[in-house]
Image (cartoon, helix red, strand yellow):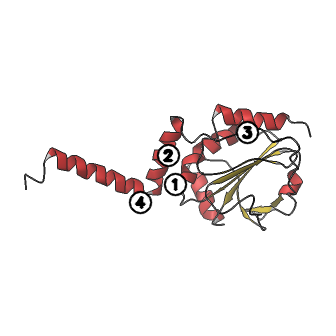
Amino acid sequence: MREMMTKKNIINAVFIALFLIILFVPSAKAFLMQGLMEIGLFKPRTEPIAAGTPPADLSGIKFEDKSGKTVDLGSLKGKVIFINFWATWCPPCLAEMPSINKLYEQYKSDKDVVFIMVDADSNLAKAQKYMDSRSYGMPVYSVASNIPENLFKGALPTTIVFDKQGRISYNESGAANYASSKFIEFIEQLKNLKI
């Protein structure tokens, strides 16, 4: 029995246990990813919009909140629109949520920036419970129409940002730190574009 309780075996057992926790517990995986975001990994790639890029036709793309209020993206022309597709069971989604909330807190009173957090499972009660448990104030929606595949291919998390003219300025899948100074500068550039 003493041979099994050597220092090396104990250390190996601890590493295996940590690996299994990270592998099978979404919140543990999200916590690890948040730490990696803090040290500079998972930066969103922001590039300027190519000159002459036509605006997308956003009318008819709809999302519904828990009270049944529907938002049509076409009605938001003239605003910067930040859309994030996520789910409560998705570790990368949970990992980026604090940074999105920080960005939201910075712009929540800005009438030129709109946030739409889309629960991919359309379980608004569960999604809102998650937001409330973390004291996040971001508005939660479910999909209320067809979403064009060029916007959302089904990967979680997916974040899309439209400029004031309705042009896709950012469309990436995977976790990112949206509270970074570079991304905030990107949002400011989009806000200052003339329509």
Of discs 3 and 4, which sits in the foreground?
A: 3
Would you say the residues marked 3 and 4 are in contact, meaning their CB atoms lie under 8 Å apart? no
Q: Secondary structure at mark 4?
A: helix
Give the CA distance from mark 1 to mark 3.
26 Å
Where residue 5 sits in the image (x, y, percent)? 13, 51
- Residue 73, position in %: x, y? 83, 56
Disc on the earlier residue, 2 or 3 = 2
Q: Which residue is mark 3?
A: 47
**Amino acid type of the residue tagged 3 in the rendering:** Glu
Q: Are marks 1 and 2 in contact (CB under 8 Å)?
A: yes
Q: Earlier in the sequence, mark 1 or mark 2?
A: 2
The dot on residue 33 is 2
User: Can I make out residue 25 in this image?
Assistant: yes
Q: Which residue has dot 1 on it?
A: 91
Residue under the point 86% across and 36% down: 193
Residue at left offset 86%, top offset 44%? 164
Label 3: state its secondary structure. Answer: loop
Residue 105 disc label: none
SS of the residue under disc 2: helix
Kindly report the distance in space between the C-alpha atoms of the residues bearing marks 1 and 4.
10 Å
Which circle's residue, 3 or 4, is located before the other in the chain? 4
Q: Please count the marks in the image.
A: 4
Q: Amino acid at mark 2?
A: Met
**Figure check: 29 above or below 104:** below
Q: Quadrant of residue 25?
A: bottom left
- Label 1, residues with CA under 10 Å away: few <14, some 14-19, many ≥20: many
The crowding category of the residue bearing disc 2, from other C-alpha atoms within 10 Å (few below 14, some 14 to 19, many at least 20), is: many
Q: Disc 4 designates what residue?
A: 24
Left or right: residue 128 compared with residue 30: right
